[in-house]
Image (cartoon, grey):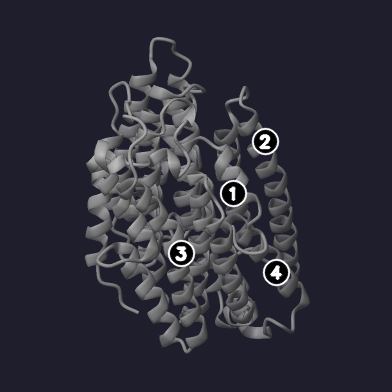
Amino acid sequence: MMLDLMVILPLVVVGAGAILMMLLAAFDSLDKERTSIVGIGLFAFAFIVQLAVTTGGTVTPFNDVFNGMLVANSFTKVAGLIIIAGGFFSSVAAQTYYVQNKGYVPEFYSLMMFAVCGMLLLTMAAELITLFIALEIMSLAIYTLVGYDRKSIARSEATLKYLMLGAFAGAFFIMGTVLIFAGAKSTSFAVVGAVIAETGFLSNPALVGGAFLIVAAFLFKAAAFPFHAWVVDVYDGAPLPVTGFMATAVKTAVFAVLANFLIINGELQASWVTYLFYISVFTMFAGNLIAIGQDNLKRMLAASGIVHTGYLLIALVAINTETFNGGVILFYLAAYAASTLGIFVALSYLGGDEEQRISFDDFNGLAKVRPYSAAAISIFLLSMAGIPPTAGFMGKFYIIASAFQAGYVVLAILAIASSVLSMWYYLRLIIAMYFKEPEEAFETSGITFAPVGTVILAFCVFAISFYPVVL
């Protein structure tokens, strides 16, 4: 009983925190600064609770009550840590961002916590109806976060694009769930896996069609080719802290649940290997081609996020369903999250009023005016490019090594080529910061937490690289 309670306690803490923040938003006496401190504090407390959770292997919490709807293990625990950390540092960025930018609403931190609550539930879901509920909790909160500033045309346009395409993805998931239920007479992952083991996957058309629609819905959420077109415009239109939150926490939740779905049965994963092989290749190179042509940093980072989705798909191609522990996927997600959150926290601090500094040229000579900020941004960019001794290098090393180990030599070589190609747009900003003359003083205003968050994340970029992963 106590172990079951501890397993779901982080979910309860985040959900209760979201409701608390929603109630506090009704009080005018709670100003913007105090609200941000409460939101950051709740995320910090949730992270500590998640860190303290000991799953002791695979645990089905309160099985008699939930009827096996939730499953927790070390994979879900680490994924939850990354998600909560994403919420924490995005809240730190938001505190700084709204010192200089308009559009703040008291419900901001509540919406972010509701999104994290949905993501945590998503990682633990062991059946499709629970998974859909979690997906909608996350998605509705994210839709609102992207476009709650109704006076901004860019925010409204981004929300419309994301909402319309997200509705199609949700419809695909529902139709896929119906077909899975028709083929297996259950929505439980365990039962579906048993049915596939007994009757075969390809011999059951309903299961094939259902799995296709569900995987397509997840590929949309992960911004994989050919469902990547929405990413650049939506990320560009969203506020900087929300963009960083979407790029890290949402991606972590989606890949966690996609991995959990594919390992239901070895035959299910094997039937998708060929398709995921080509999807990962097209995703990497499509993202690179989009990123190379960008002058806007947000759009470049959005396109680079597509590339990183391609690397993560390589890990899904190479996984062994019998000995799956998710170590490679989680390591890469942690490394990517630290780097991406770091640069978005820094941009929230340096972007200025109404995101006036957002292009490459806007950061010319930053190293001569703010050397520490330039150094931190350089660390994050080098990690994303995969330069040693950063966590990003080790993450790509583990991904490529797992592909070699699984026999996908061509895929590993293409991943290396993609990584080399990506250096162009990452090093471009470093060149602008260090080898060009400053055009302004990069002045900021107000008391902000972002510099502290940037330092912590820069340290994490190196610290994560020392954590060993068993292939």
Q: Which mark is residue 439?
A: none
Separation of residues labelled 2 and 4 (CA atoms): 30 Å
Q: Residue 146 is drawn in which quadrant?
A: top right
Which comes before the other along the chain, label 2 or label 4?
2
Q: Residues within 10 Å of mark 1 (few under 14, many from 20)?
A: many
Q: Which residue is mark 4?
A: 212
Indicate the quadrant containing the C terminus: top left, top right, bottom left or bottom right.
bottom left
- Callout 2 touching callout 4 (CB < 8 Å): no
Helix, strand or loop at label 4? It is helix
Name the spot of residue 160 as percent of width and height, x first.
69, 38
Task: Write down the quadrant of residue 15 in the picture.
Answer: top left
Q: Secondary structure at mark 3?
A: helix
Q: Please name which of the two marks, 4 or 1, marks the residue nearer to the observer.
A: 1
Disc 2: which residue: 157
The one nearer the camera, 90 or 349, is 349
Q: Position of residue 98 (x, y in %)?
A: 42, 25
Q: What residue does disc 1 label?
A: 232
Residue 425: image quadrant is bottom left
Q: Which residue corresponds to the image point at 43% horizontal and 38% vertical from the top-left? A: 362
Classed neighbour count for the residue bearing mark 2: other residues with Cα under 10 Å, few (<14), some (14–19), many (≥20): some
According to the picture, the residue beneath numbered tag 3 turns out to be 422
Number of the front mark, 1 or 3: 3
> Closer to the N terminus: mark 2 or mark 1?
2
